[in-house]
Image (cartoon, rainbow, N blue to C red):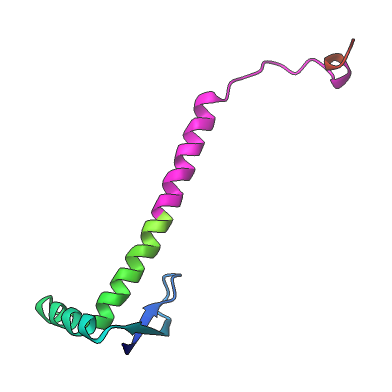
Amino acid sequence: MGKYFAETFSGDGKSTMKNITLSVDDEVIKKVRKIAIDKDTTLTQMVRDYLHSVAEREVSVKRKALQELERTFEQYSGSLGPMNWTRDDLYER
């Protein structure tokens, strides 16, 4: 296993970079470096891009779930009419 050092975005959209250490099999590193060369990029940039896409997907999933919940509330929320009753009226026996 080789250790690979990469820099990633902090996740808040700012240009602040944090260093992380990954343990990755040497053969995997060699293969991905060759892929990176073919794509005219670096292994570090590929790791950055991957982590960024994972974070964005998570935000997208949460945003979609919230929108669906809001649509459901709008669809099933109805007017109960004027509130001309009191709590005591509801529990009157």
Residue at left 43%, top 57%? 59
Residue at 85% of width from left, 21% of height from top?
87
Give the magenta part as a residue range.
Answer: 60-88
Check the picture and name the quadrant holding the C terminus. top right
Q: Position of residue 17 (x, y in %)?
A: 41, 82
Picture residue at 62% right of the left edge, 19% below the top: 79
Q: Position of residue 84 (x, y in %)?
A: 78, 15
Residue 72, x across and y down, in percent: 50, 31
Give the main secondary structure, helix, strand or loop, of the magenta stretch: helix
In the image, is residue 64 part of the stretch drawn in magenta? yes
Q: Which residue lies furthest to the left in this view?
A: 38
- In the image, residue 87 above or below residue 15: above
Q: Which of 42 and 73 is in front in this view?
A: 42
Whole-percent x, y for residue 43 in the image: 23, 81
In the image: residue 13, left or right of residue 45: right
Please state which of residues 84 and 25 is positioned toward the viewer in this rendering: 25
Number of callouts: 0
Closer to the camera, 92 or 86? Answer: 92
Depth check: give the residue in front, 32 or 58: 32
Which quarter of the figure has residue 92? top right
Q: Quadrant of residue 24?
A: bottom left
The residue at the far top in this view is: 93
- Is residue 91 found left or right of 40 in the rendered image? right
- Give left or right: position of 60 versus 37: right
Q: Which residue is drawn at 35% across and 68% down?
A: 52
Q: Is 8 a magenta residue? A: no
Relative height, residue 24 to residue 75 (above, below): below
Rendered-image quadrant of the N terminus:
bottom left
